[in-house]
Amino acid sequence: MTMLPGIQRLGEFEWQVPVGYVPGMRVPGLFFLSEALAGTLEEGAVQQLANVATMPGIVRQSLAMPDIHWGYGFPIGGVAAFSLDEGVISPGGVGFDINCGVRLLATPLREEELGKRRELVERLFGAVPTGVGGKSTLRLSNRELDRMLVEGSSWAVREGYGIDEDIRMCEQEGCMKEADPAAVSQKARQRGMPQSGTLGSGNHFLEVQVVREVYHPEAAKAFGICQGQVCIMIHCGSRGLGHQVCTDHLRTLEAATKRYRISLPDRQLACAPLDSPEGRAYFGAMAASANYAWANRQVIMHYTRKVLEELYGVAYRDMHLIYDVAHNVAKMEEHLVGGTRMKVCVHRKGATRAFGPGAPDLPPAYSSVGQPVIIPGSMGSPSFLLHGTSGAMEKTFGSTCHGAGRVMSRTQAKKRLTGREIRDALGKEGIIVRAPSDAAIADEAPEVYKPSMEVVRVVHEVGISRLVARFEPLGVIKG
Amino acid sequence: MSFEELEHTADAKVRVKAGTLEELFSEAGRALMQVMYGCPGKDGRTHPVAVRGDDLESLMHAYLSELLFIAEVEGLVISGADLRIGDGFVEGVVRGEPFSMEAHNAGRGVKGISYSGLSIVHDQESYILDVIFDV
């Protein structure tokens, strides 16, 4: 097998990037990868993992999950915790799409009961605004937007876009209490207002899926799913609002980096001490954006439920939210570090929280199993449900992978197959794809991603989350 | 003046070449539109633009971030720009046409302009910009 030079093997799936790989590293880097995935590792991604290890106050290791790939600032799949007294916060550790995340909705329908599939896909495509320039039907005032930014999921539920039970089934109950709408610029608001309740573009999607295989019946029972059941997966984030918050604060934090004399190998890692005015402002704005994203997914789930209600006569309340997880976020959490409990700021950039059994912030029904971890596949490929573990609490600050991770550029992808060819090929497998354009489909062809099964197998074997079930797509609404 | 998309696994990496700084900024804006909408816009409307930055790279970052904002909020697909560039500032007007779902649907939503990998080099003949758009 081939592994990049300078990297040390610690175990079957564990690899260390030693201090000194790049100058100024304070801690080593650690990533998880199987031999089968080793060939997909980019040198640029390892460099970024090592760059993160140079940041002040980083605790234990700079981590990356097996879906690691070359991003900006942190690598995608990167996780790092920072101490509250010496540590920093950085938009480069969260990304432009703050709280890009996934939610999974269970329906009482079985695969064989799901007739009218093309009509279902068309109706969902009509109900959920998608793609570049897709506009919301919500008309928010600045005051309403403020409430959305402060309250997250519960704002949407109170406005009639859901039921009370939905709120409990979101990571952090769909609301970061640290949100500070005053730190969200007018520009971010202008971008966010017309986009609330829209899916967006790129890798964002809404999928009709079936539970094809259950690996862990006890956990599946706790999460309320069984083989053959139809579910809906929604993948999107904080839209232009979050993107602008990242852009705005990147500038102020770049100035702060100089002011606090922090030396960094990459400008995208611009950061400020957690306990500084600039650091607090970014954290407050990021939390507000995270809340916007939770409200956004709540609204989209509402549209979805209404379509299923109308088309199949399923009662709204009989479609229950299994869980909603964030993939791009920084949070204050308590973790065991060197035998002592310590409050740290955990950055997850393309990584999922994977809290184990008994952890705080879990719905009572899931407390004995651990939190649901939702791993979306790429368009047309399987998605997975896992559960969090105590292993994740020990090794990765309660974190695991977030998806498949790209292996092919979009320019390469477009040279290989056209959107139409991909759509036809998926159609032959019984998967109906609907997108604003064929170009959008060509970008996200299944083969441009690492095999999601292999990524998930690694986190399962390492024990930072364990497999519960596999889902296969029946219909895809692509943004 | 020209731009081309380079290989990048996750995002869109673009290389822009131009004889002058003003052309470099104008062409960079067209490259951003190419990625976002599948084609740069046509002339018709104009919109003022003014940004500040400490150095050339941060000026470019601020300028492209501003164009992303104008495109999304004003619905303007930008075709080019008439700019004045001085010490720490860029100002002028951008030209373009209104966004339409039918004409501009072959792109990818750009989330932001990355500082990682942003570089501007200048040799005797031209300026070369490399920049990554997060898509």
Image (spheres, coloured by chain):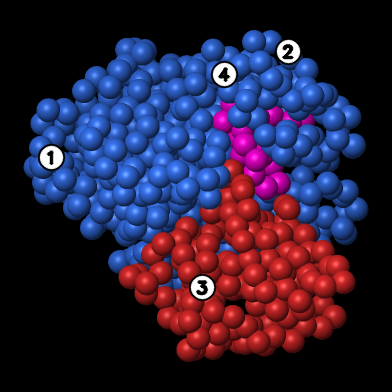
In the depicted view, which residue is nearer to us: A225 or A166? Answer: A225
Mark 3 nearby-residue class (10 Å; few <14, some 14–19, many ≥20):
many
Q: Colour of chain B?
A: red
Q: Quadrant of the N terminus of chain A?
A: top right
**Disc 3 chain ID:** B
Residue A77: image location, x then y, percent = 60, 35
The amino acid pointed to by label 1 is Val
User: Which chain is drawn using blue?
Assistant: A
For the residues carrying marks 2 and 4, which lies nearer the camera in this image?
A: 4
- On the image, numbered disc 4 is attached to which residue? A36
* Circle number at residue A10: 2
Q: Magenta part of the protein: which range? A: A58-81
C-alpha gap between disc 4 and disc 1: 43 Å
Q: Is residue A233 left or right of residue B119?
A: left
**Residue A199 drawn above or below residue A391:** below
The amino acid pointed to by label 4 is Ala
Q: Residue at x 76, y 76 (%)?
A: B19
Q: Is residue A169 left or right of residue A393?
A: left
* Circle number at residue B40: 3
Pointers 4 and 3 in contact (C-beta within 8 Å): no
C-alpha gap between disc 4 and disc 3: 41 Å
Pointers 3 and 1 in contact (C-beta within 8 Å): no
Mark 2 nearby-residue class (10 Å; few <14, some 14–19, many ≥20):
few
C-alpha gap between disc 2 and disc 3: 50 Å
The amino acid pointed to by label 3 is Pro
* Circle number at residue A314: 1
Residue B66: image location, x then y, percent = 62, 73
| Secondary structure state at the residue bearing disc 1 | loop
For the residues carrying marks 3 and 1, which lies nearer the camera in this image?
A: 3
**Residue A187 drawn above or below residue B85:** above
